[in-house]
Amino acid sequence: MWFAALRRLGGLFLLASALALLGAFVFGIAVGADASRAISVAFYVVGAFLLIAGFFVGNRGPVRLLGGERGAYMFFGSRFVRWASPGEREENINLSAIFFVLGFLLILVGVAADNRYEVV
């Protein structure tokens, strides 16, 4: 069970790293920045975004809109609410933890990739 969970987390880490590298090369070429600096900044930005996303996902309240999947209904008409199920609340906490761990790992990779300072 733990091996499968670590494998999935590693897959998410590789996907987030690949997207950060792709964004680093695209924006680095566009602004003419040094490749190693663009890579470290991209890892910082993506990691910080995931940390912030984890914070907001984890702080979602226990109340959900009833019929919220209908789009414009959320803005017009009566607003009926329901309590989130325990499964929904647990899923929010788990998703928040995944975002936090991935964000922290990406920031660590950005620190290691930053060649302006020595890590050791």
Image (cartoon, rainbow, N blue to C red):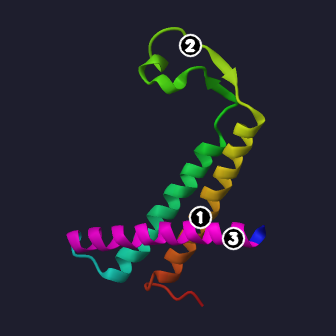
Q: Earlier in the sequence, mark 3 or mark 2?
A: 3
Would you say the residues marked 3 and 1 are in contact, meaning their CB atoms lie under 8 Å apart? no
Q: Main secondary structure of the magenta part?
A: helix
Q: Which residue is mark 3?
A: 6
Using the rendered view, name the quadrant where residue 3 is placed.
bottom right
Instruction: Quote the CA–CA distance across marks 3 and 2.
Output: 41 Å
The amino acid type, in three-letter code, at marker 3 is Leu
* Residue 58 circle label: none
Would you say the residues marked 3 and 2 are in contact, meaning their CB atoms lie under 8 Å apart? no
- Give the secondary structure at mark 2: loop
The residue that appears at 49% across and 66% down in the rendered structure is 16
Would you say the residues marked 1 and 2 are in contact, meaning their CB atoms lie under 8 Å apart? no
- Give the secondary structure at mark 3: helix
Magenta-tinted stretch: 3-30
Q: Which residue is mark 1?
A: 102
Judge depth for marks 3 and 2 and give the one in front: 3
Q: Which residue is mark 2?
A: 79
The amino acid type, in three-letter code, at marker 1 is Leu
The residue that appears at 53% across and 24% down in the rendered structure is 68
**46 with respect to 83 (left or right):** left
Of the pair 112 and 25, the residue shown nearer to us: 25
Q: Earlier in the sequence, mark 3 or mark 1?
A: 3
Magenta span contains residue 51: no
**Coordinates of residue 30 in the picture (x, y in percent):** 21, 69
Q: Badge 2: how crowded within 10 Å, few (<14), some, or many (20+)?
A: few
The residue that appears at 61% across and 14% down in the rendered structure is 80
Of the pair 95 and 40, the residue shown nearer to us: 95
**Coordinates of residue 55 in the picture (x, y in percent):** 61, 48
